[in-house]
Every structure is written in C-alpha cells, then in structure tokens.
Amino acid sequence: MDKLRITGGRPLEGEVRVSGAKNAALPIMCAALLTDQALALDNVPRLMDVRTMAKLLAQMGVRIGAQEDGRLELQAAVVGHPEAPYDLVKTMRASVLVLGPLLARCGRARVSLPGGCAIGARPVDQHVKGLQAMGAEISVERGYMNASARRLRGARIVMDLVTVTGTENLMMAAVLAEGTTVLENAACEPEIVDLARVLRSMGARIEGAGTTTLRIEGVRALQGARHRVMPDRIETGTYLAAVAAAGGKVTLTGTAADTLGATIDKLSDAGARISAQGERIDIEMASRPRAVSLSTAPYPGFATDMQAQVMAMDCVADGTAHVTETIFENRFMHALELQRLGADIVIHGNTAIVKGVERLQGANVMATDLRASAGLVVAGLAAQGETVIDRIYHLDRGYEALEDKLSRLGAKIARVR
C-alpha cells in the first residue's frame, strides 16, 4: 500500500496550477444521463473518484471516451442498466447522484445506499423526500433504493437541512419534470452553480443557483453541451494552508479566489499576505502563523473540507485556537494523528482546542479520510524531520498529482511503498 514520505521544515516556493474541482466534476458527469447527446467536459481532474464515477456510468450503458489533457466526453445514447451496485457505491458516496437523473430519464432506478468516508452519518433522506414529493415511488430493500416514476412532476420542496448532494440530485431530477419545481433551503456552494451552468447550456431552465431558493421549469428533453469544470477551491485552499503553515511564497494559477472567501479571510487573519487577480492567487508567509479559531458552516461559511488543513496550521501557530465542527460529527479523527506529531489538541464535544507549539516532529501517521489526509500533509510539511503518511489512497480520491505539485514548490515529498 502506498505511503507518502515527507521531510518537512522547508518553506514552499514557486508556482503550481490548480486542477478542476472533484466536487463539481462528479455531479456534472451524472448530468450526462439526462440526454442522449454527447456531453464534452474540459478541466476534469485525474482522480480515483472520477474513474469510479466513469466506471459506474459505463456499466449503465454510457459511452465514456478516454480522458486526455483534462478532456472527457460522455454520451448516454441508451441507458440500458439503470442501477448503481453496492461494490461501486460503497467506495464513493457521490454515486447517489445518479438517482435523480435516472428517475428523470428512465423512470426507474436501483441505487445502493451510499458509503464513502468514515466521517459520520450522511443520510439520503432529503433526496428521497424530495423525489417522493415529485411523484416517485421509492422503497428500500436489502440496502438498495428502488425508485420508479412515470414522469416526475414539479413540486415545492423545503429541505429540512442544507445538503449539497441533495440539492444537486433534486435539481437534476427537476430539469426533466413536468411543471415547475421550487427547492427551498437549497445549498449555495459554487459547485452547485457550476452544475446549474452546464444544465442551462444543455437547455434546462434554472433560476436562483447560488441562493437558498432554486426555481426549475421542467423541459421535455435536454441536448448535448461543452463545459469547463470550475477550479477546485478545496485543492486551492489546501495549498494556501500549506504555505501558511510551512512558510514561503507561492503563486497558484487556474483558480478562482471568489469561491474561497472564508478560507482566505482565516489565513489572512493568521498573517498570510494573500492577493488575487483573475485566475491567480499569490500567498506569502514570512513568519510563524497566528492562531485562528473557526466554526464550519454551509457555504459561504467556512468549509468543513478545509477544517483539517487549517487545524494543522493552528498546530504550529502562536496562540490557542478553537475549531468547531458543525457538519460531520466524526471529523476530528485526524486530531489523534496530529498529536503523534506533537500537536497539543484537546477535544470537547464538537470543538477542538488547539494550542500551537513552536514546531511539530515527524512521525508515522495514518490517514482516516480524504481531508484528514490533506491535513496530515500540511502538518508534515511544517514538521521537523520525516513524516510518513499511510493509507494515502484517500488522497488519490481528491488531489491530482499532489506530491508532484508539492515537489515543484520545493517540498521534499515522495510516494513510497
């Protein structure tokens, strides 16, 4: 099993290009199910989750072209097998995003209940409730959701809690439904705006993307389109946090600062000098960071996917930070691994109290989920000596060529067995 070996204590210097967003690419790939015409995508990252989604769609009958230079073409001329089996869904929770498109296009779907990272309960009840309001009949038998509908009907749906995948699933179902659907308490993430953008280019009628209320007027059919996947704001934030923790001066290109408000604000509070122009972000950190407290929240609040990385920075910061996790109840598992590096962290309920130390010391640690892995990388870059991170297959789910990009910035990092 692959590991990452990092010799830390070296400031990062140079330029690196940010990849396309995993959390945008996956639902957009599912949107290919909504039309029999080709959907051509640019800026698709080479990731394990993208390969898993391609495999899932291919077994349904979707033709998947070879991924080259960030380009990927999908065409669902015929969807002969509208099922998402357990052996694929268990490895990636985003697989549940096929449920809405399959119901809208085929009138039936059989989708395994999702798996994914072990970061707490992430139920799909809001997906089911919304689709039932649109006329779907859904039952759960032996771990599968069996769904059917002659044609979905527009409905007013008020989600009980903010859910990104729930918003995306219902939005994709609604674009082919009869009549108008209104989604209230919808998620506002930039990835939802990107999904709405590609759906509109396919002929969908969607208003309000990026706000808490979406209005979708169903159409009879969608057409093919070409779309460029948005930059990955979490990858961007991870590199920014790494510079803030380890020091240095780095330029990130191909990114979008306007999707990173809360992250940039916190790292600026920590003492990082950050400037942005167009698709470029420059960051310089010339001193030890200051501790910054945070509480995760749905967008535009501080992203739960950036919590571990900023906690890692806080571990070497001057002062004490309170990090509160409000989204996932099990998302402090990286704290125990950070303690192995010498971090001073005490957990009380959903709050971690992080007292910064002058330096961390390298050690063997183990990744528990995707973003925890990234947090350990940030900590390893800031630590003195050698850090070895085990179970980095989590990283491969969400970061394209991470060690190569960090090596270009002067980090001493290598993949080993």
Image (cartoon, rainbow, N blue to C red):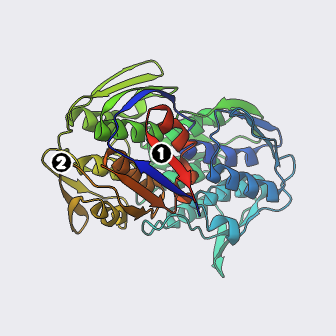
Q: Is residue 237 visible?
A: yes
Residue type highlighted by circle 2 = Glu
The percent coordinates of residue 221 (x first, y second) are: 77, 41
Image quarter of residue 71: top right
Residue named by callout 2: 358
Name which residue lies at 24% across and 51% down.
315
**Most extreme residue toward the front, as rendered?**
385
Which of marks 1 and 2 precedes in the sequence?
2
Local secondary structure at mark 1: strand
The percent coordinates of residue 383 (x first, y second) are: 31, 49
Residue named by callout 1: 413
**Measured Cα–Cα span from mark 2 to mark 1:** 22 Å
Q: Nearer the viewer, residue 355 or 154?
A: 355
Q: Is residue 152 visible?
A: no
Numbered circle sitting on residue 168: none
Q: Is residue 36 above or below residue 394?
A: above
Q: Nearer the viewer, residue 316 or 199?
A: 316
Q: Quadrant of the N terminus?
A: bottom right
